[in-house]
Amino acid sequence: MKLTIEEVEHIAALARLELTEEEQQRYAEQLSDVLDYAARLDELATDQIPPTASVLDLQLRLREDRSRPGLPTKDVLKNAANTRDDQFQVPPILGGQE
């Protein structure tokens, strides 16, 4: 699948990248090669292959989950820029009031 320069410009805009004309041409070729390779992989008969998360037989080693006391509130908040009622105070994000 051959990508056009317009498609590469659109992808670059989505990624917030500014590309030179030379980069646009190079990425058009490279991305087209990636899509061609993915299309070739799509042609493989994988019906008899079970889904695999990893080809390695790894065992997860988890530590025992134990409850322990946390830090005192005074120590946690001592470097905070702003606090109120023993909590971090941060600026509103979605139009709330301080």
Image (tube, grey):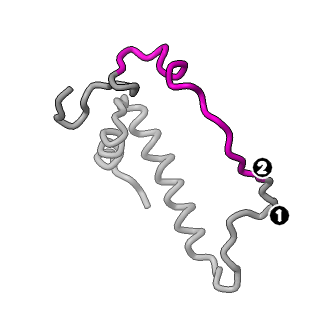
Tell me if residue 61 comes above or below residue 22 in the rendering: below
Tell me where residue 83 appears, x and y as whole percent. Answer: 36, 20
Tell me if residue 20 comes above or below residue 13 in the rendering: above
Task: Determine the image quadrant of residue 24.
Answer: top left
The answer to whether 3 appears left or right of 94 in the picture is: right
Q: How many marks?
A: 2
Which image quarter is the C terminus in?
A: top left
**Residue name at image x 43 percent, y 17 percent:** 80
In this rendered view, identify the residue nearer to me: 18 or 3: 18
In this rendered view, identify the residue nearer to me: 92 or 20: 92
Secondary structure under tag 2 reads loop
Task: Determine the image quadrant of residue 88.
Answer: top left
- Asked whether 71 falls inside the magenta stretch, the response is yes
Tell me where residue 29 appears, x and y as whole percent. Answer: 47, 47
| Residue bearing the label numbered 2 | 63
How dense is the environment of label 1, judged by Cα within 10 Å: few (below 14), some, or many (20 and up)? few
In this rendered view, identify the residue nearer to me: 16 or 8: 16
Tell me where residue 8 appears, x and y as whole percent. Answer: 36, 45
**Residue name at image x 57 percent, y 61 percent:** 37
**Residue name at image x 32 percent, y 49 percent:** 7
Which range of residues does the magenta coloring cover?
62-83
Does the magenta stretch mainly form a helix, a strand or a loop?
loop
Q: Earlier in the sequence, mark 1 or mark 2?
A: 1
Instruction: Please state which of the two labelled residues, at mark 1 or mark 2, is closer to the viewer.
Output: 2
Q: Which mark is residue 57?
A: 1
- The kind of residue tagged 2 is Arg
